[in-house]
Image (tube, helix red, strand yellow):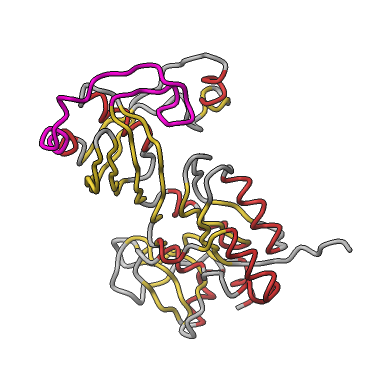
Amino acid sequence: MKSVFRDLTGVFVLDKPEGISSNQALQRIKCLFQAKKAGHTGSLDVLATGLLPICFGEATKFSQFLLDADKFYRVTAELGKKTTTSDREGSIIEQRSTQHVSDAFLQKILAKFVGHVQQVPSMYSALKHQGTPLYRLARQGKTVERPARSIQIYELRLIHRDHDFMTLEVRCSKGTYIRTLVEDIGEELRCGAYVTELRRLAVGSLKESRMISLEQVETIFEEGGLAALDKTLLPIGAMLLHLPICILSTQEAQALQFGQTIQSPCQEFGLVRLYMDDDQFIGMGEVLKTGILKAHRLLSFAHNL
């Protein structure tokens, strides 16, 4: 019997397992939910595990706000070695002594990476050069110039150290490559380092406690079908909890739908979450310094107001 794909709207917070790509994980979830439209927000390496938000239907309109959100990772690295890919998937290309790397020296170096940092993306990143992902060029043995990018490391904590292995927690801005960060730390330590394990614990307002594994979601489907799966979805507003709420009357919401601006009923400035007075999320708006509210991104079904 041919599957009937469904119009769904919401966010599923997947705990991506190691060993599959983010797109492979997306396709498995999309198939289980029998969804017409779905997309993930920010790839995780095949090596990496953890939080991978998957947006269905109208939620895809707001996925950029998760791509731009801050991230939180836990990473384990081995000191004293460098690999071609800056992680354990690559070949070891250099080994150096770690005898000089005391805990005090390590903490001193870690402190240097907190704040605004210039980072040169890895050749094994998904960034594109003239339309071709860098990792494809790297696999062909090619190297191209990559301009340094400004990122921000809000927090970099040493959680555990066992001889040449260290585990760090990293709270950082969008565009931060953890493999590159670990490799740069290794260079500052004068011994080299590469990632052995990487797990993402938060993306914006979506936290580890919300994650559901592939095995769990398959069990949920087997035991309760699509109705049980749908209960695992979060509303679109869950992606935007960092934004203040602005409550609109039906008339105000209709005015925004027709492309008009209105006098803002809320006191906040900048981007806001828009809700009807019946607690229905309808999209995002922007409150200008003049107190005028204009639509920024609205749900399609809000046209039926």
Q: Position of residue 245 (x, y in %)?
A: 37, 73
Is 193 in front, or is 226?
A: 193
Can you name the residue that lies furthest to the right here? 1
In which quadrant of the rendered view does residue 34 lie? bottom right
In which quadrant of the rendered view does residue 225 lie? bottom right
Q: Position of residue 156 (x, y in %)?
A: 23, 45
The residue that appears at 46% across and 54% down in the rendered structure is 51
Q: Is residue 21 magenta?
A: no
Q: Position of residue 147 (x, y in %)?
A: 37, 23
196 in relation to 30, above or below? above
Q: Is residue 90 magenta?
A: yes
The residue that appears at 35% across and 63% down in the rendered structure is 242
Q: Position of residue 122 (x, y in %)?
A: 41, 27
Q: Which residues are magenta?
A: 80-108
Screen quadrant of the N terminus: bottom right
Screen quadrant of the C terminus: bottom right
The residue that appears at 30% across and 38% down in the rendered structure is 151
